[in-house]
Image (cartoon, rainbow, N blue to C red):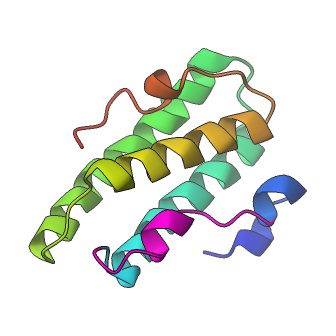
């Protein structure tokens, strides 16, 4: 999944999960999976064009659920979605919402999280 497929220039040039990539506690191959979840979210927003926050939250909750599943893989690889990861992921969800013109509540964006 390539960020080049994204049309939004602000998003296309963004470094997703940069804090997690810089921390050896998080295996890069799993951070890559997280990055893919975020890129897929951007592509969904561009294709489905949510008209309001409720429609945006439907998309972000589905992506959050994918992070929930990914959390198990982190645990299996002696890592976990702990405080630094939670903050980095939440900040990226907020960045995406703002980049697409939404003034969304950061906690509501990731309301379905179990990490």
- Residue 37 in view: yes
- By secondary structure, the bulk of the magenta-drawn segment is best described as loop
Asked if one can make out residue 8 in the rendered structure from this viewpoint, the answer is no
The residue located at (77%, 69%) in the rendering is 5
Please identify the quadrant where the N terminus is shown: bottom right
Q: Nearer the viewer, residue 38 or 79?
A: 79
In the rendered image, the vertical position of residue 57 relative to residue 99, given as above or below: above
Magenta stretch, residue numbers? 13-25
Above or below, 107 against 27 in this view is above
Q: Is residue 15 magenta?
A: yes
Q: Nearer the viewer, residue 35 or 59?
A: 35
Residue 33 included in the magenta stretch of the image? no
Task: Find residue 64 and report its image quarter.
Answer: top left
| Quarter of the rendering containing residue 94 | top right
User: Does residue 41 appear to the left or right of 42 in the view shown?
Assistant: left
- Residue 106 in percent (x, y) is at 52, 27
Residue 95 location, x and y as percent?
Answer: 67, 43
Residue 20's place in the image compared with 115, above or below, is: below
Q: Is residue 15 left or right of residue 26?
A: right
User: Is residue 103 rendered to the left or right of residue 30?
Assistant: right
> Which of the two residues, 28 or 53, is positioned nearer the viewer here?
28
Q: Residue at x 47, y 76 (%)?
A: 22
Q: Position of residue 30 (x, y in %)?
A: 35, 75
Residue at x-position 77% and y-position 56%: 11
Quarter of the figure that contains the C terminus: top left
Q: Is residue 65 left or right of residue 35?
A: left
């Amino acid at each position: 999944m390539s960020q080049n497929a994204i049309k939004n220039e602000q998003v296309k040039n963004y470094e997703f999960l940069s804090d997690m990539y810089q921390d050896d506690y998080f295996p890069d191959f799993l951070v890559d999976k997280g990055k893919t979840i975020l890129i897929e979210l951007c592509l969904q927003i561009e294709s489905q064009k949510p008209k309001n926050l409720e429609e945006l939250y439907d998309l972000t909750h589905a992506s959050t659920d994918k992070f929930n599943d990914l959390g198990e893989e982190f645990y299996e690889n002696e890592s976990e979605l702990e405080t630094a990861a939670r903050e980095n992921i939440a900040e990226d969800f907020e960045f995406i919402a703002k980049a697409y013109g939404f003034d969304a509540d950061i906690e509501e964006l990731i309301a379905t999280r179990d990490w």
